């Protein structure tokens, strides 16, 4: 079984993906980490972030089994990833690797921006998880503060709106729901309600 979960930053799709994978005994891949890994690889050796050829080489050397969220969650790496993600050569390499990951038995839950539309258009279940920009900014702000970090809500909200515009406006694989995706708006949902909603869509697909 392949489950594709798409949505904007801080919508809750990653948490849902991890819980669904654990519940169903499937592997999980946060595809955003693959782009972050490319950005991090370039940052680590001081290479420019606007060179498609160098970025493509870095992408071809990423090990999907060695992605460390603790390292790759840094803000500057996220900014680098957002710039890398608009490069078609990089997307082609990473999409191919993500697709191979998904197709290995017993299946997988993948979350990202273009899973249901590009990476796994034939996924058994497609979910599009979203929430208002203000809600997503508040969640991200609370998460940072809970880890004793320092962040401004207004800056986070501006960053989220900027990333949304960049993700939705890019010409290659823009962020958008697949035509057959189930929409889950988590603006007023807690994680348990969102999880039960997502699981219900999966169980429904199993019986079809």
Image (spheres, helix red, strand yellow):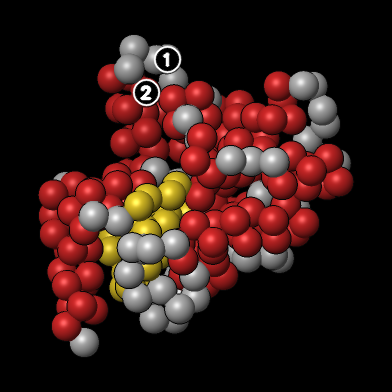
Mark 1–mark 2 CB contact (< 8 Å)? yes
Residues packed near mark 2 inside 10 Å, few (<14), some (14 to 19) or many (20 plus): some
Cα separation, mark 1 vs mark 2, equals 7 Å
Can residue 168 be seen? no
Q: Mark 1 or mark 2: which comes first in sequence? A: 2
Q: In the shown orientation, is residue 62 left or right of residue 17?
A: right
Q: Residue at x 22, y 63 (%)?
A: 198
| Residue matched to label 2 | 144
Query: Residue 20's quadrant in the figure?
Result: bottom left
Q: Position of residue 32 (x, y in %)?
A: 52, 46
Which residue is label 1 attached to? 150
**Drawn side of residue 89 relative to residue 208, left or right:** right
Residue displayed at 64% across by 41% down: 62
Above or below 157: residue 187: below
- Circle 2 sits in a helix, a strand or a loop, which is it? helix
Residue 173 can be seen, yes or no: yes
Above or below, 157 against 126 in this view is: above
């Amino acid at each position: 079984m392949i489950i594709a979960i798409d949505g904007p930053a801080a919508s809750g799709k990653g948490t849902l993906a991890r819980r669904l994978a654990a519940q169903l005994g499937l592997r999980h891949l946060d595809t955003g980490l693959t782009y972050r890994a490319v950005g991090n690889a370039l940052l680590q050796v001081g290479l420019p972030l606007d060179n498609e050829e160098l970025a493509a080489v870095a992408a071809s050397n990423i090990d999907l089994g060695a992605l460390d969220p603790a390292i790759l969650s840094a803000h500057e790496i996220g900014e680098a990833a957002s710039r890398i993600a608009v490069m078609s050569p990089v997307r082609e390499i990473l999409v191919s690797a993500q697709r191979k990951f998904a197709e290995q038995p017993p299946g997988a839950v993948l979350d990202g921006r273009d899973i249901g539309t590009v990476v796994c258009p034939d996924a058994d279940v497609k979910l599009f998880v979203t929430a208002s920009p203000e809600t997503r900014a508040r969640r991200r702000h609370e998460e940072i503060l809970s880890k004793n970090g320092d962040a401004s809500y207004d800056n986070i909200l501006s960053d989220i709106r900027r990333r949304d515009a960049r993700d939705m406006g890019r010409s290659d694989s823009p962020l958008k729901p697949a035509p057959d995706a189930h929409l889950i708006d988590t603006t007023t949902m807690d994680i348990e309600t969102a999880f039960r909603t997502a699981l219900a869509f999966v169980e429904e697909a199993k019986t079809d």
